[in-house]
Image (cartoon, helix red, strand yellow):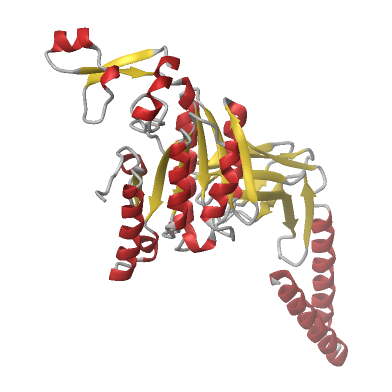
């Protein structure tokens, strides 16, 4: 818009000078007309040749990054002519929330410039960084010349992953702590350690020699192959979430699911995932870097736009859960129907834990109705002896997910 305004001003000035020169016949006015015409033609010629011999490009160093990390790209401009380029502008068009900053530079004859551009990534998702735009113009700003260099680059921003040093998978009912499943104890031959006895431990887990040595009851801890698999179920039904932007409950839910999944994978355990977004996304349990990338890519793009009730999603997931697996449910739903579905899983030998979001806290509500709904779902979980972690807006995930909360029924 600015070059067009300047051009109109020059056209107006030229018109005034031409009319004045032919009306008065003054030689000096004709000189100004010729000078103005020469300046315009010279500016046009200079702008046309401004990008000749210019080579430019950019390279994104980390096109796969996490929320909170810094996106970095290296830019380079080469001038292959014997004439300097006093003004060259470079930028990228993108749909990033905060794009990489452009720059206006000068390049000496047969010289080059290189620099590192940075921007902090604040929102997960898949984005497009367009090809490099290069522009220059004449000293008067009347004309510009532009060229496009390179191809678009895709940038994937993974959800933030929080360290969970104290996260432990809950014991499934096959570990011997439930009397009706005690016969499966023999299938766990690996003892990983000894710890003090706590209320509820099975008698056949007591290590008597260590108990005598420590003068208190000690129990054996097993590396249970039956509980090697974790299945994450991320509830993305619209009604189960609240808030907008980076402070929405869905962002906390995605961060919690990503952190739990990667923490479990780091312990060499298989992880599967169900995300009930607009369509149901399912990743079968697997180990290693490959499934980690699949989980992060999926969680980078899901939104709270699902329409499937959580109870239906749990029932649809049941055929894929086998004895000894652990289901970790991340939800903000206060509909008690899904609690009954979880109770049936425990009877089938599937461990269950719930990460429960306090949906009202993400919109600043603290009324009696919202507290009653939250307490009702927590009491329902306690009634079926299902442990849960409660997450509120602003909570430290590492601390909130470290301890298992229970509400006495």
x 25%, y 30%: residue: 200
Q: Is residue 339 left or right of residue 103?
A: left
Q: Residue furthest bottom?
A: 23
Residue 193 x %, y %: 31, 15
Q: Is residue 229 above or below residue 183?
A: below
Between residues 313 and 3, which one lies in front from this camera angle?
313
On the rendered structure, is 20 left or right of 97?
right
Residue 189 coordinates in the image, percent (x, y): 42, 12
Q: Residue furthest left?
A: 215
Which residue is located at x 47 percent, y 43 percent?
344
Which of the 4 quarters of the picture holds residue 154? top right
Percent x, y of residue 390:
34, 49
| Residue 235 against residue 226 in the figure, above or below | below
Q: Is residue 69 left or right of residue 221?
A: right
Residue 362 against residue 199 in the figure, above or below: below
- From the viewer's side, name the closer residue of 228 and 133: 228
| Residue 116 visible at all | no
* Residue 59 appears in the figure: yes
State the quadrant of the N terminus.
bottom right
The extreme front residue here reads 180
Give the residue at x 33% y 27%. Answer: 177
Q: Nearer the viewer, residue 317 or 121?
A: 317
Total labels drawn: 0
On the image, which quarter does residue 201 sit in?
A: top left
Q: Position of residue 93 (x, y in %)?
A: 68, 55
């Amino acid at each position: 818009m600015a070059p067009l305004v300047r051009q109109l001003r020059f056209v107006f000035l030229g018109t005034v000078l031409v009319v004045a020169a032919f009306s008065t016949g003054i030689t000096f006015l004709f000189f100004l007309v010729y000078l103005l015409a020469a300046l315009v033609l010279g500016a046009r010629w200079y702008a046309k040749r401004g990008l000749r011999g210019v080579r430019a490009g950019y390279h994104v160093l980390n096109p796969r990054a996490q929320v909170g990390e810094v996106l970095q790209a290296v830019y380079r401009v080469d001038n292959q002519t014997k004439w300097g380029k006093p003004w060259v502008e470079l930028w990228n068009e993108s749909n990033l929330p905060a794009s990489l900053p452009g720059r206006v530079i000068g390049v000496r004859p047969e010289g080059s410039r290189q620099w590192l551009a940075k921007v902090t990534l604040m929102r997960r998702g898949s984005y497009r960084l367009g090809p490099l735009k290069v522009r220059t113009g004449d000293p008067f700003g009347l004309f510009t010349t532009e060229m496009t260099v390179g191809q678009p680059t895709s940038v994937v921003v993974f959800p933030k992953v929080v360290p969970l040093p104290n996260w432990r998978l809950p014991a499934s009912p096959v570990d011997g702590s439930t009397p009706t499943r005690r016969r499966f104890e023999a299938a766990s031959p690996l003892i990983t350690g000894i710890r003090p006895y706590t209320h509820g431990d099975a008698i056949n887990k007591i290590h008597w020699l260590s108990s005598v040595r420590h003068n208190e009851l000690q129990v054996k801890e097993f590396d249970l192959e039956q509980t090697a698999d974790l299945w994450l179920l991320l509830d993305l039904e619209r009604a189960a979430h609240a808030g907008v932007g980076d402070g929405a409950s869905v962002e906390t839910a995605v961060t919690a699911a990503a952190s739990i999944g990667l923490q479990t994978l780091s312990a060499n355990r298989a992880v599967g995932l169900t995300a009930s977004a607009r369509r149901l996304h399912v990743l079968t349990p697997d180990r290693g870097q490959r499934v980690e990338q699949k989980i992060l890519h999926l969680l980078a793009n899901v939104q709270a736009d699902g329409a499937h009730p959580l109870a239906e999603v749990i029932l649809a997931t049941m055929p894929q859960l086998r004895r000894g697996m652990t289901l970790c449910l991340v939800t903000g739903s206060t509909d008690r129907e899904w609690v009954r579905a979880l109770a049936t899983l425990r009877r089938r030998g599937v461990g269950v834990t719930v990460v429960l979001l306090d949906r009202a806290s993400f919109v600043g509500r603290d009324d009696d109705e919202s507290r009653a709904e939250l307490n009702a779902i927590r009491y329902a979980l306690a009634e079926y002896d299902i442990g849960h972690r409660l997450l509120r807006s602003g909570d430290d995930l590492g601390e909130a997910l470290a301890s298992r909360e229970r509400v006495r029924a």
